[in-house]
Image (spheres, grey):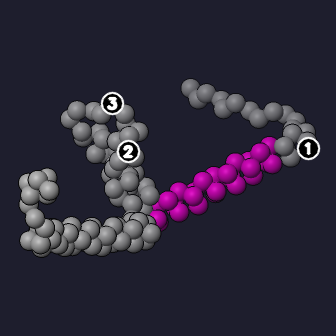
Amino acid sequence: MRSAAPSPPATVSGASYAAAAVTMAHYKAADSKREQFRRYLEKSGVLDTLTKVLVALYEEPEKPNSALDFLKHHLGAATPENPEIELLRLELAEMKEKYEAIVEENKKLKTKLAQYEPPQEEKRAE
């Protein structure tokens, strides 16, 4: 026996048909925007990166207390360096070198100065 398919309503008013068409158009527009956004994320590598980090979390033998911190840590490591940060790192390295050179020079000057000053014991006797 064949079961009869439900029959459509006998009458559809023009207003309800228009409302249904507007609603369908709205859903299609939203789906289109979602699809565009998904393609954008895929093209820019965001989906791939998120997938890799989530897989790493899934495969982690001991789950971290904070999954969000895990994601932040792993995503932060994957992001390219900000040029300003790199410049600051270079400047810091230069300053450390200068500091070490000044400390070394200071040691040499103290040694040289000690040759010309009397020992501390003689100063106290005076």
Residue type at numbered disc 2: Leu
Q: Secondary structure at mark 2?
A: helix
**Which of the two labelled residues, at mark 3 and mark 2, occupies the earlier sequence position?**
3
Residue occupying image coordinates x 40% and y 46%: 72
Q: Main secondary structure of the magenta part?
A: helix
Q: Is residue 27 above or below residue 40?
A: above
Q: Nearer the viewer, residue 97 or 13?
A: 97
Does 8 sit left or right of 13 as displayed?
A: left
**Image quadrant where one finds the N terminus:** top right
Within 10 Å of disc 2 (Cα), the crowding (few <14, some 14-19, many 20+) is some
The residue to which callout 1 is attached is: 14
Nearest to viewer (mark 3 / mark 1): 3
The residue to which callout 3 is attached is: 65
Between marks 3 and 1, how big is the CA–CA gap? Answer: 57 Å
**Which of the two labelled residues, at mark 1 and mark 2, occupies the earlier sequence position?**
1
Can you give x and y, in whole percent of width and height, for residue 60 in the image?
24, 39
Does 113 sit left or right of 90 as displayed?
A: left
Res. 86 in view? no
Residue type at numbered disc 3: Asn
Q: Nearer the viewer, residue 37 or 80?
A: 80
Mark identifier at residue 61: none
The residue to which callout 2 is attached is: 71
Q: Is residue 105 above or below residue 7?
A: below
Res. 47 in view? yes
Q: Secondary structure at mark 1?
A: helix
Can you give x and y, in whole percent of width and height, for residue 97 in the image?
24, 71
